[in-house]
Amino acid sequence: MKIIIEKNYEDLSKQAAEIVKQAIQEKLNLVLGLATGSTPIGLYQKLIQMHKQNVLDFSKIITFNLDEYLGLPANHSQSYHYYMKENFFDNINIDSKNIHIPNGETKDVKVFCRDYEQDIQNVGGIDLQILGIGSDGHIGFNEPGTPFNSRTHLAKLAQSTIKDNSRFFEKEEDVPKFAITMGVQTIFEAKKILLLASGENKAISIAKALEGPITSQITASILQKHQDTIVILDEKAASKLKRKY
Ligand code: PGA
């Protein structure tokens, strides 16, 4: 694992965008795994800027999002379909047929999850996966206790995640209780992983994930074993690490 500590969120986003840019320039039909939440917003903004300056062409990239809330229609303002459209896809030249996001309204979750895995396999696997981390150490919606060998599945959100995500909803009761998420194994199979974390409220989960025991109680800790993971932190998210990087 390579750990990069940047001064602040702006620098973290810049550094992350450089890595994604390089990957796309090396492989125009890159298979890019994408995350939602507050953390990657700055990265998406930088990539959009690069596109507007004609530095980056997204016309051939293929994307797979990590997760989606169960039961939210794509046009719901808090769905991850909506988030991706607003924060990234509507502002770049991606081909809509290359976009994959779990369908929160699927009638058959099991079949959907199996097909999602198959779709990833059919394009040769994920080349670069962007990740955030939950305050409980989750990646995707792989909450504490999710087995490392899990694949795309229906996940029950931990109470702490519901609380964390309630800031996006009117009230806590409105946060969906379930989501479809790539599994830990699905994520682990990505050839390269870029984990981003910003702010003090991530410091404990980052310290546990990077320096603690590898345990399914902190699903991000499996990344210690991944062959090509880059972690970019700002100083606040890095503040509880024991080692100096
Ligand atoms: P955040 O979420 O980027 O909104 O903090 C990260 C996550 O829960 O994985």
Image: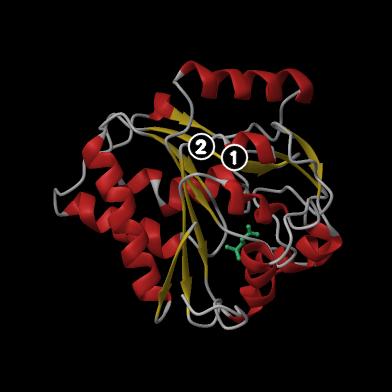
Label 1 packing within 10 angstroms: few (<14), some (14-19), many (20+)? many
In the image, taking residue 142 as reference, residue 120 lies left or right, namely left
Q: Determine which residue is flagged by label 2.
A: 190
Which image quarter has ligand 1? bottom right
The location of residue 198, given as percent across then percent down, is 52, 73
The kind of secondary structure element at disc 2 is loop
Q: Which residue is mark 1?
A: 187
- Which label number is shown at residue 11? none
Q: Is residue 113 visible?
A: yes
Vertical relation: 100 (above or below) 235: above
Query: Measured along the vertical axis of the image, is residue 71 above or below residue 224?
Result: above
Q: Quadrant of residue 63?
A: top left
Name the residue located 43 percent from the left edge and 54 percent from the top edge: 87
At label 1, the amino acid type is Ile
Helix, strand or loop at disc 1?
Answer: helix
Is 54 in front, or is 81? 54
Q: Is residue 22 left or right of residue 132?
A: left
Instruction: Tell whether label 1 touches label 2 (CB within 8 Å).
Output: yes
| Mark-to-mark CA distance, 2 and 1 | 6 Å
Spot occupied by residue 213 in the image (x, y as percentages of width and height): 74, 61
Name the amino acid, label 2. Answer: Ala
